[in-house]
Amino acid sequence: MSLILLSLSQDFIYHGIAAFFYLSASVALARVTLDLRGSNAKGIKDYKLDISAVVFSYVATLLYFIHTVLSAIRWKTF
C-alpha cells in the first residue's frame, strides 16, 4: 500500500516539476520571439515558426499542468 502511495506522489512531483520547467522555457521562448519581431535578421517564415513553437509549448505546459492536478487528485483520494 505504501509503495503505491509513494508511486502516486512521485508521479505528482514529477509532473509538477515538468510543468514548471515547461512554463519557464515557454516564457523564455515567447520573449525571444517578441524580441525578434522587429528584427529583419530572420525571415517572416522563421518568425512564424517561432510563433507556432511558442503556442505548442504553452499547450504542452497546459497538458502537464492538467496532468499534475489530476495526479494530485488521484493521490489524495487513493
Image: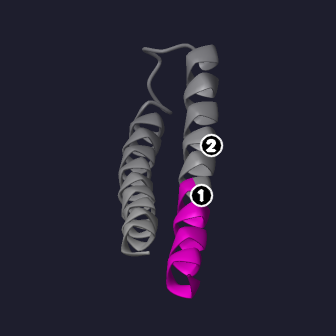
- For residue 17, what is the image quadrant? bottom left
Q: How crowded is mark 2: few (under 14 residues within 10 Å), some or many (20 or more)?
A: some
Which of 3/24 is in front? 3
Q: Where is residue 59 in the image (x, y as percent from the top left)?
A: 63, 49
Pick the residue in front: 64 or 75: 75
Residue denoted by label 1: 62
Give the SS element for disc 1: helix
The quarter of the picture where the N terminus appears is bottom left
Q: Which numbered marker is on residue 41? A: none
Q: Residue at x 56, y 82 (%)?
A: 78
In this orientation, which residue lies closer to the viewer: 59 or 36?
Answer: 59
Q: Which amino acid does label 1 sit on?
A: Leu
Give the residue at the far bottom of this rendering. 77
Task: Give me the disc on residue 55.
Answer: 2
Q: Give the range drawn in magenta.
A: 64-78
Identify residue type, mark 2: Val
Q: Residue at x 60, y 34 (%)?
A: 51
Q: Residues within 10 Å of mark 1 (few under 14, many from 20)?
A: some
Q: Where is residue 48 in the image (x, y as percent from the top left)?
A: 64, 26
Q: How far apart are marks 1 and 2 (CA)?
A: 11 Å
Image coordinates of residue 8 in percent, x first then y, are: 46, 67
Query: Which numbered disc, 1 or 2, marks the residue that appears first in the sequence?
Result: 2
The single residue placed furthest to the front in the displayed view is: 1
